[in-house]
Amino acid sequence: MSCWLLKTEPEDYSFTDLERDGRTVWDGVANNQALIHLRNARPGDEALIYHTGDERSAVGLARVVSEPYPDPRSDDPRLAVFDVEVGRRLPRPVTLAEIKADPAFAGFDLVRNSRLSAMPVPPELWRLLLARAGL
């Protein structure tokens, strides 16, 4: 199982929207490196949903429930999507400021390459993030 961090603008699609919908197509990824990560996701992988914009924090958990597939709303064959299912809201959001303040995260893509909208989370950082969230 792999773990991922998936960014979303809460004004466009928030974790609350995912809680309401239960399941959604994770789309809108156009960055080449983020698309590579997205294509490596597999059913059963876990994901942290991260709100960008003013919030800048991890707020919930989700699970990848499909293999990556071509974006059905695009004619661009390089764009891929997958389906995610809601997990649970984090008891406590984990802010970007907290993450940046911890030297353990210095090499994490969220800190190093903030433009990526999908990125892997190494197991040791996954455990740290969940602990900070109160899980």
Image (cartoon, grey):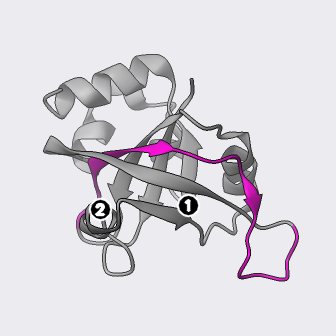
Q: Earlier in the sequence, mark 2 or mark 1?
A: 2
Q: Residue 11: x percent and y percent?
A: 31, 80
Judge whether residue 73 is colored magenta: yes
How many numbered markers are drawn?
A: 2
Q: Nearer the viewer, mark 2 or mark 1?
A: 2
Horizontal relation, residue 71 to residue 108: left or right: right
Residue 14, image x and y in percent?
31, 69
Report, in whole angstroms, how far the alpha carbon at label 2 lies from the one at label 1.
20 Å
In the picture, the quarter occupied by the N terminus is top right
Residue 60 or residue 98, whichever sits in front: 60
Q: Residues within 10 Å of mark 1 (few under 14, many from 20)?
A: few
Task: Examine the rendered structure and indicate whether residue 22 appears above or below residue 104.
Answer: below
Q: Position of residue 78 (x, y in %)?
A: 85, 66
In the visual, does 9 lie left or right of 93?
right
Q: Which quarter shows the C terminus?
A: top left
Asked if the stretch drawn in magenta spans residue 48, the answer is no
Is residue 56 placed above or below 99 in the rendered structure?
Answer: below
In percent of the image, x 65 and y 37: which residue is there? Answer: 42
Q: Identify residue for label 1.
A: 115
Q: Amino acid at mark 1?
A: Arg
Q: Does dot 2 land on a helix, a strand or a loop? A: helix
Q: Residue at x 59, y 68 (%)?
A: 27
> In which quadrant of the rendered view does residue 40 lie?
top right
Residue 124 is drawn in which quadrant?
top left
Would you say residue 5 is visible in this rendering?
yes
Residue 101 vertical placement versus 76 (above, below): above
Q: Which residue is mark 2?
A: 15
Q: Residue furthest top?
A: 124
Q: What residue is rendered at 39% in x and 26% in y?
A: 126
Q: Which residues are magenta?
A: 55-77
Identify the secondary structure beneath mark 1.
loop
